[in-house]
Image (cartoon, rainbow, N blue to C red):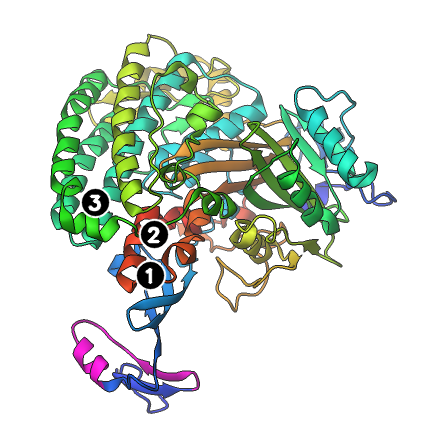
C-alpha cells in the first residue's frame, strides 16, 4: 500500500508540507502482475505537489478574512492559503492555533463564534504527517473557514484552543486518542473513545484495521486491510 | 460465581477500597444503603450511573458527585459504543461508505447518508438530479419526525410518562413502514448514495407519505393534550437543564437545544443545501432555554417538517434519481421481482448476455469503485440533534483517505455538566434527555 507512495518536499525549510502522493501504474493494483502495459506510468495526484497558495484575489469573503487575519497577527500568520471547491483553508503554525482562534473569534470583522469541528488527518509520507483541521463558522457573517496545522511524530504538540472554544475539549481529546497529537494547555487530555489503557493511536495510517480472515468452503478471505486493493 | 480468586466478594453490598467504601446497588435495596451510610462523615456520595442504566439514554455513563440530592459535579464518560466507523471506511469504496455512516446515529440514518453523499458529491463536483434532491428532502424530514418522536418517547419514559413512550414509538413505526416500502429497510438503509438515491419511490410511496402527513397532526395534538398541560410534566421540565445562547455557542451545542435558547440558527435556512431555500417553513424558537423549551421546539419542528414534506410531494416531477454519469452511478438497477427486491432481470440480461463492456463496467465499478479527485471538503447539514458535519479527504483514489463525522450527539453531550451541576439528581436525567443524545452517533 504505502510502498507506492512517495512523499515530496522533505527538505522544505519553511515547514510547509505537501499533501498527497504519487501513484504508479494505471489501475493501482500492486500485488499482481500488471498486464496492462501501463506499469511504468507514474501519476502525481493533484495533491502530490506541495501546498501552493492560491493566487490572490481569492474571491468572495476569503480575501477579507485572510486580510484581516494578516493585519492583526502579522504577514507570517498564514503559511499557505488554499481555496479549493469553494472552501478556504488557512495553514497555520501549531503553536499559534490558540492566538489565531482567539482573533478569529473576537475581532469584529471576523466573528467566528462557533468552532464546529476539530479533526485529524494522517498523511504518512510527510515529515509533519499529523494534520489537525479546525472548522470555524461565523454566525454573524454566515461564513466558514478551515484552519489547518501540521506536526511531526518527533514533536506532535499543538496548542490547545479549549480556552477560546470550550467545545474543542472533547474533540481535541478524540484527536489525541486517535492520532496521538498532544494538545498543550488542554485541561485533561485523556483518551475518550478508546479504553484508557489502550496502546497506540488507531486512526494513524500505519495502525492496522485488524480483523481475522474468513474461511468459506476451503477458501480464505483475508481481513479488509489485507485484501487486494485498488487505489 | 460470586467470589473472586482473592476471596473478596465482588458483588457484596459493600466493600472498602482505597478510594473509600463502595456500595453496589441493584434494584430496590435503597433503604439498606441509606441505613448504612453515615450522614455526618459521608456528606458527599459519588454515584455511578450507567453505562447500562436505563435512564442514561443508551450506553452513556455519568459519574455524579452528590451532596444529599444536589449534584455537585457530573462527569460524562463515553466511548462504550465505539465501533471504528471512520477507520473502517478507509478500507472500503466511496459507495460502501454510505453503509457505514448510516450506522453511526441510528435514529437519523438518512441524515448521515445525505451529509456524507453531499461531501462526496462536492469532492466529485457533480450535481444530483432535481428529483433525487426532492426525495432526499422528503426522506430527511420523515426521518426528522421519527427521530423527534423517539426523543419525546424516551424523554417521556425517563420522566415517568410511559404513555408517551407507547404513542411515540407507535407513530414512529408508521414512518419506518414508509422507509421499508421505499428502500426495503427500516433503519440503516444506505438509501442515499453518492450521485442521488438508490432507487425511485415505489408506486404507492407518495400515497403512503400523504396518508402519514394527514394522520400526524392529530397525533401531535394528542401529545400536547397528554403532556403540555400536565402539571407533573411541567414541574419536571420547566427551569430544568438551563443553558443559554452563550453557553450553547461556547460548548458548540446546535440544533433544537440552541433554538430553544432563542437563536434561530438552522442550517436549512442559514446555509441551505439540497434545495431547502425553495421550501416555505418556519424555524421554531423559544426563550426558555430549558428542557420544557426543547420539548416545545421539537413538537413545533415536527409540524414544520410536515409542511416541508407536503411541499416536497408537490415538487416531485418525473425524472432520474441518479446522476447520468455512468462512471459514478451505481450500475445495478433494482426491481421488485417475484422473490422480493433485487437486481433487475433486464439489467442482468444486459450484462450477462448482451454486452461484454457493460459487464466489465459493472464489475469494475462494484469491485473497484470510482475515483474521487484529491482534496478535502467539509459539508454540514441540520440533523435532528444539530449540525452534522462531514470532513472528507480524498487522495485521488477509490477509497476515502479520511472521513470524520462531526456528530452533534458527541459535541452536545459535553454540555451535561453545565446543564446539571447544582441541580437535583432527578434533573440530570431530564436535562440529559432534553439533549437527545444517541450514543451510536456519539461514539461512532
Kindly identify which numbered label has been placed on residue B423. Answer: 1
Query: Circle 1 marks a residue in which chain?
Result: B
Which of these two is toward me, B304 or B189? B304
Nearest to N terminus: mark 3 or mark 1: 3
Secondary element type, mark 2: loop
Asked if the magenta segment contains residue B19, the reply would be yes
| Residue A73: % across, % down | 77, 40
Foreground of the two, A215 or B208: B208
Instruction: Tell me where residue B64 appears, x and y as whole percent.
Output: 37, 67
Q: Give the mark, 2 or 1, whose residue is nearer the N terminus.
A: 2
Residue A30 found in image quarter = top right
Per the image, the residue denoted by label 2 is: B241
| Cα gap from disc 3 to disc 1, whole angstroms | 23 Å
Q: Nearer the viewer, residue B307 or B388?
A: B307
Q: Using the rendered view, name the quadrant where residue B96 is placed.
A: top left
- Checking the image for residue B181, the label placed there is none
Residue density around tag 3, few if under 14, some if 14–19, many if 20 or more, within 10 Å: many
Q: Are marks 2 and 1 in contact (CB under 8 Å)?
A: yes
Kindly report the distance in space between the C-alpha atoms of the residues bearing marks 3 and 2: 18 Å
Residue under label 3, please give it. Answer: B153
Q: CA distance from mark 2 to mark 1?
A: 8 Å
Chain identifier of the residue bearing label 3 in the image: B
A173 w.r.t. A91: above or below: below
Amino acid at each position: 500500500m504505502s510502498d507506492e507512495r512517495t512523499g515530496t518536499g522533505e527538505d522544505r525549510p519553511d515547514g510547509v508540507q505537501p499533501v498527497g502522493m504519487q501513484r504508479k501504474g494505471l489501475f493501482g493494483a500492486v500485488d499482481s502482475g500488471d498486464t496492462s502495459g501501463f506499469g511504468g506510468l507514474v501519476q502525481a495526484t493533484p495533491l502530490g505537489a506541495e501546498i501552493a497558495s492560491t493566487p490572490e484575489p481569492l474571491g468572495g469573503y476569503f480575501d477579507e478574512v485572510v486580510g484581516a487575519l494578516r493585519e492583526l497577527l502579522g504577514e507570517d500568520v498564514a503559511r499557505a492559503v488554499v481555496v479549493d471547491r469553494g472552501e478556504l483553508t488557512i495553514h497555520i503554525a501549531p503553536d499559534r492555533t490558540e492566538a489565531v482562534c482567539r482573533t478569529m473569534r473576537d475581532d469584529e470583522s471576523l466573528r467566528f463564534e462557533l468552532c464546529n469541528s476539530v479533526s485529524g488527518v494522517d498523511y504518512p509520507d510527510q515529515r509533519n504527517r499529523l494534520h489537525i483541521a479546525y472548522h470555524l463558522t461565523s454566525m454573524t457573517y454566515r461564513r466558514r473557514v478551515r484552519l489547518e496545522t501540521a506536526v511531526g511524530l518527533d514533536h506532535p504538540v499543538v496548542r490547545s484552543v479549549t480556552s477560546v472554544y470550550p467545545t474543542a475539549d472533547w474533540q481535541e481529546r478524540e484527536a489525541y486518542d486517535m492520532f496521538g497529537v498532544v494538545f498543550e494547555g488542554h485541561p485533561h487530555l485523556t483518551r475518550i473513545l478508546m479504553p484508557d489503557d489502550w496502546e497506540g493511536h488507531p486512526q494513524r495510517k500505519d495502525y492496522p484495521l485488524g480483523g481475522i480472515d474468513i474461511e468459506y468452503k476451503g477458501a480464505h478471505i483475508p481481513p479488509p486491510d489485507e485484501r487486494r486493493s485498488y487505489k | 460465581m460470586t467470589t473472586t480468586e482473592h476471596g473478596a466478594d465482588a458483588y457484596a453490598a459493600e466493600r472498602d477500597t482505597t478510594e473509600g467504601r463502595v456500595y453496589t446497588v441493584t434494584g430496590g435495596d435503597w433503604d439498606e444503603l441509606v441505613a448504612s451510610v453515615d450522614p455526618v462523615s459521608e456528606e458527599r456520595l459519588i454515584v455511578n450511573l450507567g453505562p447500562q442504566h436505563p435512564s442514561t439514554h443508551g450506553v452513556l455513563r455519568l459519574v455524579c458527585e452528590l451532596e444529599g440530592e444536589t449534584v455537585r459535579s457530573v462527569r460524562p464518560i463515553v466511548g462504550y459504543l465505539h465501533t471504528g466507523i471512520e477507520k473502517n471506511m478507509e478500507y472500503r469504496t466511496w459507495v460502501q461508505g454510505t453503509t457505514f455512516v448510516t450506522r453511526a446515529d441510528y435514529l437519523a440514518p438518512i441524515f448521515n447518508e445525505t451529509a456524507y453523499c453531499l461531501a462526496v458529491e462536492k469532492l466529485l463536483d457533480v450535481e444530483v438530479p432535481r428529483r433525487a434532491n426532492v426525495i432526499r428532502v422528503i426522506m430527511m424530514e420523515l426521518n426528522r419526525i421519527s427521530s423527534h418522536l423517539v426523543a419525546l418517547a424516551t424523554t417521556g419514559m425517563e420522566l415517568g410518562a410511559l404513555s408517551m413512550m407507547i404513542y411515540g414509538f407507535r407513530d414512529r413505526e408508521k414512518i419506518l413502514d414508509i422507509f421499508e416500502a421505499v428502500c426495503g429497510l427500516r433503519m440503516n438503509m444506505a438509501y442515499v448514495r453518492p450521485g442521488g438515491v438508490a432507487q425511485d419511490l415505489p408506486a404507492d410511496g407518495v400515497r403512503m407519505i400523504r396518508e402519514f402527513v394527514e394522520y400526524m397532526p392529530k397525533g401531535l395534538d394528542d401529545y400536547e393534550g397528554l403532556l403540555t398541560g400536565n402539571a407533573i410534566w411541567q414541574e419536571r421540565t420547566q427551569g430544568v437543564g438551563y443553558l443559554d445562547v452563550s453557553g450553547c455557542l461556547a460548548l458548540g451545542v446546535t440544533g433544537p437545544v440552541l433554538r430553544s435558547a432563542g437563536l434561530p440558527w438552522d442550517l436549512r435556512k442559514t446555509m441551505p443545501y439540497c434545495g431547502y431555500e425553495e421550501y416555505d417553513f418556519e424555524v421554531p424558537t423559544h426563550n426558555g432555554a430549558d428542557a420544557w423549551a426543547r420539548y416545545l421546539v421539537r413538537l413545533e419542528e415536527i409540524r414544520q417538517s410536515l409542511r416541508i414534506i407536503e411541499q416536497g410531494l408537490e415538487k416531485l416531477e418525473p425524472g432520474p434519481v441518479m446522476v447520468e454519469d455512468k462512471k459514478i452511478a451505481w450500475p445495478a438497477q433494482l426491481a421488485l421481482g417475484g422473490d422480493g427486491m433485487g437486481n433487475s432481470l433486464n439489467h442482468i440480461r444486459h450484462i450477462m448476455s448482451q454486452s461484454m463492456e457493460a459487464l466489465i463496467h459493472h464489475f469494475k465499478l462494484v469491485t473497484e469503485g470510482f475515483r474521487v479527485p484529491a482534496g478535502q471538503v467539509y459539508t454540514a447539514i441540520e440533523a435532528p440533534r444539530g449540525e452534522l458535519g462531514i470532513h472528507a479527504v480524498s487522495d485521488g483514489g477509490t477509497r476515502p483517505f479520511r472521513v470524520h463525522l462531526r456528530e452533534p450527539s458527541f459535541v452536545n453531550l459535553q454540555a451535561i455538566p453545565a446543564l446539571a451541576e447544582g441541580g437535583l439528581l432527578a434533573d440530570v436525567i431530564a436535562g440529559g434527555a432534553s439533549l437527545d443524545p444517541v450514543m451510536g452517533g456519539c461514539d461512532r
